[in-house]
Amino acid sequence: MRLFAIVRREYVERVRSKAFLIGTLLGPLFMTAFTVVPSALMATQRGKPLRIAVLDAAGGLGAPVEHALRERRVLGEPRFVVEAAAVGTTDAARTALRAAVLDGRLDGYLYLPPDALARSESEYYGRTVSNVMDLGLMSQAVEDALIAVRLTGAGVPEDRLSGLLRRLDLRTIRLSDTGEREDKGGSFLLSMILLIALYSTVAMWGGALMNGVIEEKTNRVVEVMVSSVSPVQLFAGKLLGVGAVGLTQFLVWVSCVVALSFFGAHAASASGLKLPELQPVVLVLFVVFFLLGYFLYGALYAAVGAAVNSQQEAQSLVFPVLMPLIVGFMFFPMVLSSPDSTLSTVLSLVPFWTPLLMFLRVSALMPPAWQVAASILLTLATIVLFNWGAARIYRVGILMYGKRPTLPEILRWVGRA
Amino acid sequence: MTDVAIRLEGVTKGYSGHSAVSGLSLSVPRASVFGLLGPNGAGKTTTLRMVMNVLAPDSGTIEILGRPADGAARDRIGYMPEERGLYPRMILEDALLFFAEMKGTSRHEARRRLPGWMERVGLDDKWRRRRLNELSKGMQQKAQFIATVLHEPEILILDEPMSGLDPVAADVMRLVLLELRREGRTVVLSSHQMETVEKLCDSMALIDRGEKLLDGSVSDVKRRFGSNCLAIAFDGDGAFFGALPGVERVTDHGQFAELRLAPGADPQQILRLVTERVRVRRFEIVEPSLHAIFVEQVTRPGGATA
């Protein structure tokens, strides 16, 4: 009964707060903004076209290459402005171009060596060489021009060139038990949004739990509380109460996603856009892995909260708690690109990383059921162990004031009678 | 039904090396006000925490109303720690009902009792649905007190209940405590304010360095120290009092001094010597005040603040 009262207070007070309302409503908005907007920006905003020059040391390649470059367009805009190359010997021209690039008259220049045609090689000199998309486009243009020259040399009529040089349009279709569905990177984006949602909610509600523990300690409420209920009851009540708040927020979000994919699907199919599919089992596991993550990391956060006197003091101790979560998050590109590799499998079975990485695998390519079950069981066992230890640390820590204990001291509390 | 509310028998508690309480035996009579005195670090809070089952004693036994001090026993106690604490962002009523629930009182019952208690401590009903951090410090103290008594415990343990109260609030607190005693409840309070204890408490114990120095009813304790004190109200500089023949100890308040006499000292001779140096407004042979006893006991050789 008292445990229920603690859970209810924790739940009611938090759910009624403005912060919860704002976080729940604006959370998805920010989440989308943080993931979709940068990639959308990257796709649309390319900056000014590149001013480049072509230095043809092979002879006869300059004109076709320049033409090919001028033809490259992104969103209808030419991507390259081709300036006339300097005249004179190759060495003199290179010196002149080099100077032009360095003082900013050009963004870069393309050098076609004497054996460019035979070896299919060229070099680009520029102040920036990290603009991967532009360089890819440039490489394509030069390659097309070289192939065209070779084909013409082999006697192919010019009017047939464009037909022969047609590029491949590779469509990606995701195959699953429920059917086929064209995917233009949407499932990658969706996996990423869900992963970020998992990561940030586990960190956020773990942090909220820790701050709640610290607050009770600094307000000295905890002393009244433990004179009424056992520290373990209080610990469990707070863990469950904050967890219930997190779950509420999560369920609100999931219902939003369901509603969106239901209504959005109509709107999207009308406009010819295909939304990535979300299987119900993925959504269920999304909630399950959130709970696993919360109870795993929440235990550690609560233990830190009990050991310190203020939120400032918590900063340095929170880092070792947050570290595994961050490391797990950083594995995501690797796991996403090969979700069924041995390494991905092993990483996703490590309890610290299961909540993030096993879910990522689930969302990308459903792993064998036994792996999902094993990861959940392993994590549950770790949760039991961690919460047992955290409750013991909590029991000692909440009545400790004064100097902040060191990590070894805190760990010793686990063994204290 | 026993007439002892709380009994400690040889209770010892140590923290990594040093002992906070050693071999402490106490008994608090029912339906009385009991003062637990001692300097800072004497072990008062540790003792109270053990009674509340927050800490477990290393050895010794604690009985509450004739039964071992366990989880069930502490539901019959209301505990107000020295450092006050409520949830600052909670609404007063919600917080108080919650604390009553923590003691096993139903929300319904607690809600029924709340208005009566608010009136009793002088907390206007308009504050009932306000957040605690909107209340003044004095009102928060009152709220804290209600949180301690709302489950209507048979025993109240109050750590420094008067500290931080203005004289009016302190009067209200004193009256409520006396009422509670009349209702047959037991009040245990720890305090540094000797005057409070002297006037309010029926019995007391003085502890220092985790050991009991003396205990008993307040009048017994004072009598035990005999009528060997002089209370002098005076105008002038009383710096010479300590050098007078037969004076063992002086508590000089500036215009009032308490002189503890050695056995066989002659009060008449001291009066003569004193009147030569300062203007005496009052001169009285009295029992020592608790203040004097407290200071004398804890500053004995080997005492905490010597």
Image (cartoon, helix red, strand yellow):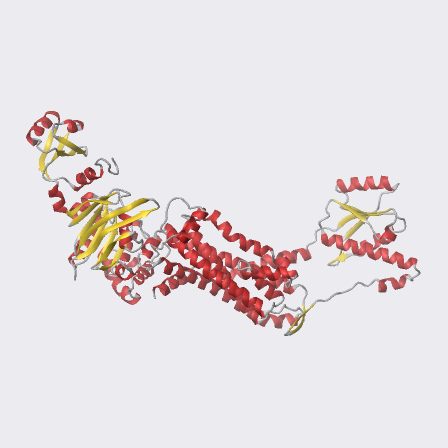
Q: Is residue B155 left or right of residue A296?
A: left
Q: Residue at x 17, y 38 (%)?
A: B292
**Image quarter of the N terminus of chain B:** bottom left
Q: Most extreme residue toward the bottom, as rendered?
A: A178
Q: Nearer the viewer, residue A81 or A10?
A: A10
Residue A26 is situated, as x and y percent measured from the top left of the image, at 52, 60
At which x and y percent is residue B257? 15, 34
Q: Is residue A235 above or below residue A105?
A: below
For the C terminus of chain B, give its image quadrant. Answer: top left
Q: Nearer the viewer, residue B261 or A100?
A: B261
In the image, what residue occupies the spot 79% across and 41% down? A98
When asked about the image quadrant of residue B61, the answer is bottom left
Q: Residue furthest front?
A: B59
Residue occupying the point 51% across, 53% down: A322
In the image, A405: left or right of B160?
right
Among all residues in the image, which is located at the extreme top? B276
x and y, in percent, of residue B24 in the image: 23, 48
Residue A357 place in picture, x, y as percent: 58, 61
Q: Is A11 situated above or below B274?
A: below
Q: Is residue A269 visible?
A: yes
Between residues A291 and A111, which one lies in front from this camera angle?
A: A291
Q: Residue furthest right?
A: A155
Left or right of A71, for residue B41: left
Residue B142 makes an appearance in the image: no
Residue toward you, B175 or B201: B201
Where residue A143 sits, quadrant-wise, is bottom right
Tell me: residue A30, above or below residue B205.
Answer: below
Count of marks overlaid on the render? 0
In the displayed structure, would residue A327 be above or below residue B238?
below
